[in-house]
Image (cartoon, coloured by chain):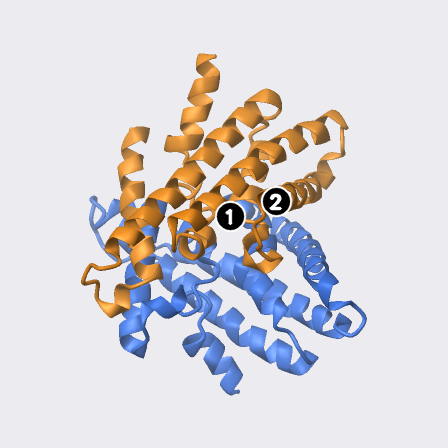
Amino acid sequence: MTNGLDVLRSGLLTENLILLQGLGVYALTRYTASIAQAWKVGSTMLGAMITGALGLWIVELLAIPEYLGFISCLAVAAFAAWLWQRLIGLEVSLSDGLLDTALLGLLLMLTRDHITGYMGMVYAAGAGLGYLAVLLVIAYLRNQLELAPVPKAFKGVPLVLITAGLLGMVLLGFKL
Amino acid sequence: MSKLIDGVFRQNPVFRLALGLAPAIAITTTAMNGLVLGLTTAIILVVAALISAMLTDAVPKTARPVVHLGVVAVLTLGAHRILLGIDPQIVADLGIFLPLIVVNGFVLHSLERTNAPVEAVLDVVGKGLGFVGALVLVGAIREFLAYGSIFGAALLDTRLPLFALAASVPGGMVILGLLLALYNVVTGQGGELND
């Protein structure tokens, strides 16, 4: 169980997908304009990540040849994202982040590091929670900064990236 | 010609449209990484745009995104094989960011706007060059700050790096954020437009 908790914690903190691995930055800049939007996108991705890990487990049980690994990851990611978008009622097109780099990146990392089965799902849950938490924190900070006298050139994406970078530096401390 | 120049500067995918930020942050720890990933992405985009433009009339509008994804996936697999043949170390350095070209927002957004083949190719060539330029610039700055070198050539004779965090993802976010703000100052555009 401790091992499972460690895996969950690493997905949430020390290997945070957005802040420490640079995956899902598109969502960070596009879907953090409001807390409600961040919650919807983050929870969609949390569900998709866990479902994606379950899908990878099934793919492994089906003994699909290794050279089809990338295609199967892509298919599983697309299905998981589509399913959770339908369940949560999120309207996002393919080019607008239906297939987020964080989702496909996570599945590729799970395959690369041979983390499958129950552990893969626990890691995906940690990664998804970390993703959701970052979107919510950035959305909250953007809300707070709305009335702050931010220079025009820094408004929008530059400020989001600098804020996220500083948060990521804090998380780096957990790796030491 | 104006489309080409627009793609490089006025409509730069990274600095103006804020697309393809994940590779621009995660993989550009060195200028060489930025160059290789940028060039690979740009070549895949140009070929995919040409194929998509030729298929435009044959494929219904609703099915186009899936076709684009399939075309880019096949081209990415091909690029992976070619790079593996040239230098396996490059593939190892790029890690999962090479296959992630498939879901690169910059690639998928650009393909959505493809029209006539010639126009489409000119448009994506400009944007592709802009993407390569942006990744090389970010990579060169980060490599200089973190290791005191550019493209592996040592420029500073120092044991302590200027800013070691530049090689980390959070450092990359801060540097890219500052570059985006600088771009906004130079072009007189507001950051909010990038939202």
The residue shown at (40%, 63%) is B195
Q: Is residue A141 above or below residue B58?
A: above
Task: Please state which amino acid type lies under the numbered disc 2.
Answer: Ala
Q: Which residue is mark 1?
A: B94
In depth, the one of A55 and B167 nearer the eye is A55
Query: Badge 1 sits on which subunit?
Result: B
In the image, which is nearer the foreground, mark 1 or mark 2?
A: 2
The residue shown at (64%, 29%) is A54
Q: Is residue A122 visible?
A: yes
In the figure, residue B186 lies in which quadrant?
A: bottom left
Q: Which residue is mark 2?
A: A81
Dot 1 falls on a residue whose secondary structure is: helix
Left or right, B76 with respect to B10, comes to right
The residue shown at (43%, 63%) is B18
Task: Please state which amino acid type lies under the numbered disc 1.
Answer: Leu
Left or right, B116 with respect to A127, comes to right
Q: Is residue B74 above or below residue B191?
A: above
Q: Position of residue B89 (x, y in %)?
A: 53, 45
In depth, the one of B172 and A82 nearer the eye is A82
What colour denotes chain B?
blue
Asked if the residue at tag 2 contacts the one at tag 1, i.e. Cβ–Cβ closer than 8 Å, the answer is no
Q: Position of residue B27 (x, y in %)?
A: 44, 50
Q: Is residue A11 above or below residue B82?
A: above
Mark 2, Cα crowd under 10 Å, few <14 / some 14-19 / many 20+, is many
Tell me the CA gap for discs 1 and 2. 25 Å
Q: Which chain is orange?
A: A
The residue shown at (44%, 57%) is A30
